[in-house]
Amino acid sequence: MSFEEYAALARQLSEQRRAGEHHAAAESARRRDLNAAVDYLQQRLTAQGQRLDQLGRAIGVDQPPPGPPAATGPGPAPGAGGVSAAGSPGPVHGAFDGAAGVPGRSDVGAYPPLPAGETRLALPTAVSPAGVGVPAQRAAIDPAVELELARRMADEADRHGQQAELLAQRPALLPTWSPLARAVAVYAACGTAAGVLMLMLVVASGVGLVDGFTLGAWICAGLPAVAFFAGYLVLGRWGRPAMVAGTPPRYLPLGFLICFLLVPMAYCAYLLLVRGLR
């Protein structure tokens, strides 16, 4: 071999060594990037888990429902199936015994012998390029692709979590209304219901079941107080968002004014209507 051939071979080996070093450096940087991505994704998943726990506690779910109980029955006896006492797998009956494995069919053999001249059919096996009859291996999984899929799923989980938080910040009663409008609607509805009860008392007074003093007491104080406390309780029960700490404003002076004015005004309107009809 001439000197030029030795020099060319040395240059080729040096190029291969530099290419190997570059490849090793690129692979090391890729692994560092993958590890950093895994750590960041782990932190995101941990934060998502903590936020989901907070949402669960806010809606009254402290922990996920327990799974199905594990089987507590006795294990298979040695020699009857599974692993024997010596650690070697024992003969398994019932799984491959055919008709003999069925209770009450002890007189039937496992599998009848084949007639002369017939052979059993072999099960098909996957053929790989490495050899015949060897199952083919699964395709290699790219960690970068799997991390990208996990990141997209984490983004989707964040989006759904934000939607759940927005829904949790709304009360169950009239969620799109403002707190003031909700309070006015609740107190007005309770006052209207008290007005209906007032009409029933007026009818009862007309037939002599309720005297005038009792009717006046219910109209001026009893029914307005019942309507006010009913609205107060309704706002406290269904007008409070799940994710808002503390008690939302219930506008007590406004509710008191609405309830204690609506019922007497309804009674006055009833009197005017009756006189107008007469």
Image: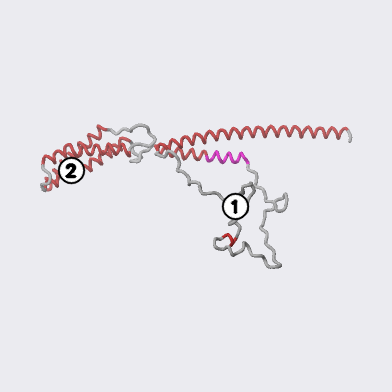
Q: Residue at x 89, y 34 (%)?
A: 2
Q: Nearer the viewer, mark 2 or mark 1?
A: 1
On screen, residue 118 above or below 201: below
Q: Is residue 39 left or right of residue 201?
A: right
Q: Is residue 114 left or right of residue 229?
A: right
The magenta region covers: 142-153
Q: Residue at x 11, y 39 (%)?
A: 213
| Disc number for residue 198 | 2
What percent of the width, then of the height, locates residue 225? 21, 37
Quadrant holding the N terminus? top right
For marks 2 and 1, give the CA distance.
Answer: 80 Å
Q: Secondary structure at mark 2?
A: helix
| Disc number for residue 176 | none
Q: Amino acid at mark 1?
A: Gly
Where does label 1 land, which residue? 81
What percent of the width, then of the height, locates residue 126? 67, 53
Quadrant hosting residue 17: top right
Task: Tell whether position 130 is magenta.
Answer: no
What percent of the width, then of the height, locates residue 57? 41, 37
Q: Secondary structure at mark 1?
A: loop
Identify the image's colour scheme: rainbow, by chain, secondary structure or one colour.
secondary structure
Most extreme residue toward the bottom is 116
